[in-house]
Image: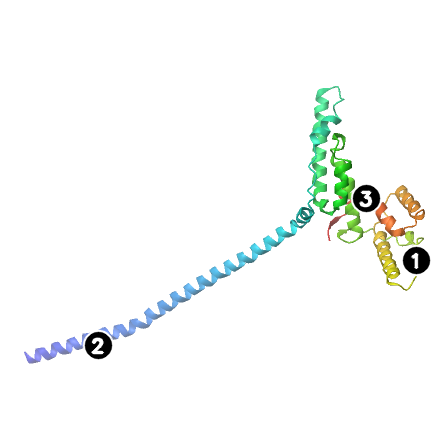
Amino acid sequence: MAQSAVVGGEAATGARHRTTSLMIVEKPATQIKVSQGRNNANRTISAALGAAMEMRVRTIQTLLFIAALLISQIASAAEGVPFPDLDTEGYCTALVSKMLVKTEQQIERDKCLLEERALRARLEPFWYLVKRTESDRLKKNYLTEVRFQTYLTVNSFVASALGMACLDGRVFCSPDEPPATTALSAFRSDYYCYLGSTDAQSDKFRNCSTAEKKRKEQLAKYWTKIPGAKKDWCIGWAFRRDFLPFQVLSNCVAEDIGTECLKQTRKCHPG
C-alpha cells in the first residue's frame, strides 16, 4: 500500500509537472496572440485617424474653394448691389408685339428669351466689378421702362467695368502681341501733370507721371484690337481735353476691351 501511495504520488507529481510545462509552453503563444491583436488594433486606429485627417483636409480645401467662388457675390452683397432681375418676358413680348403671324411671333419671342438668358449668364459673374454709383445710374435712368428691361442695357455697364478691371490689373485679360507701345508714343503726360502741379519735383507731379506711365503700359497691351474708328475718336477726344491723356484713352476704350472678354474673343478671368 505504501509503495502504491508512493507510485501514485509520483504519478500525480509527474502530471503536475507536465501541466506546468504545458502552461509554460502555452503562455508565450498566448502573449504573442495578444501582442498581434494589439498591433492590429493600433494599425486599425492609425488607419482610421489617417482617413479622418485626410477627410478633414479635403473638407477644408473644398470650403476654401467654395469661398473663393463666392468672393464676387460677397463683394456685391457687401455693396448692397444685387444683380438686376429684369422683366425680360415683358421686354421680349413687347419686342414682337407688332408681328402679324402668331406662330412667328411666338418663335421670335422664345428666341429673344433664350438670348436674354444666355446674356445674363455671361454678365452675372462680372457684375461685382460695377461700382455702386454706376449701378444706381443704371437703375435710375434705364430700368424704369419696359424697353430697357433687357440685359443688353446692363451689358455696357458690365463691359466698361470689366475693361477697366483689365486695365488696372484686377482681372487678368490676355494681352495683344506685340503691345502697341509705338502707337501711343505721341502722347506726353508730363505737360498735363505739370498743369496739376507746377513743381516738377513735387510728390504730386511724380505720382501723376508714374500713374500715367502705368496706364500707358497697360493700354498698350489691348490697343491693337480696338476698332480703328473707335481709336480715332478716342485719340481726338484725348487731344481736345485738358485731362491726362492715358486716363482719357483708358476710359474711352474700356467698354471695347470688356466686350471682347464677354464675347470670349479675349480670355479674361479674375486676377
* Residue 174 in view of the camera: no
Residue 227 drawn above or below residue 198: above
> Of the residues under marks 1 and 3, which one precedes in the sequence?
1
Q: Is residue 18 left or right of residue 39?
A: left
What SS does tag 3 mark? helix
Q: Nearer the viewer, mark 2 or mark 1?
A: 1
Separation of residues labelled 1 and 3 (CA atoms): 29 Å
- Is there CB contact under 8 Å for labels 1 and 3? no
Is 62 in front, or is 126? 126
Q: Residues within 10 Å of mark 2 (few under 14, many from 20)?
A: few
Which quadrant, please, contains the N terminus?
Answer: bottom left
| Residue 18 x %, y % | 22, 74
The quarter of the picture where residue 213 lies is: bottom right
Is 256 in front, or is 201? 201
Which label was assigned to residue 194?
A: 1
Q: Residues within 10 Å of mark 1 (few under 14, many from 20)?
A: some
What SS does tag 2 mark? helix
Separation of residues labelled 3 and 2 (CA atoms): 102 Å
Residue for point 24% across, 75% down: 20
Q: Nearer the viewer, mark 1 or mark 3?
A: 1
Residue where numbered disc 3 is placed = 255
> Of the residues under marks 2 and 1, which one precedes in the sequence?
2
| Residue 217 x %, y % | 85, 55
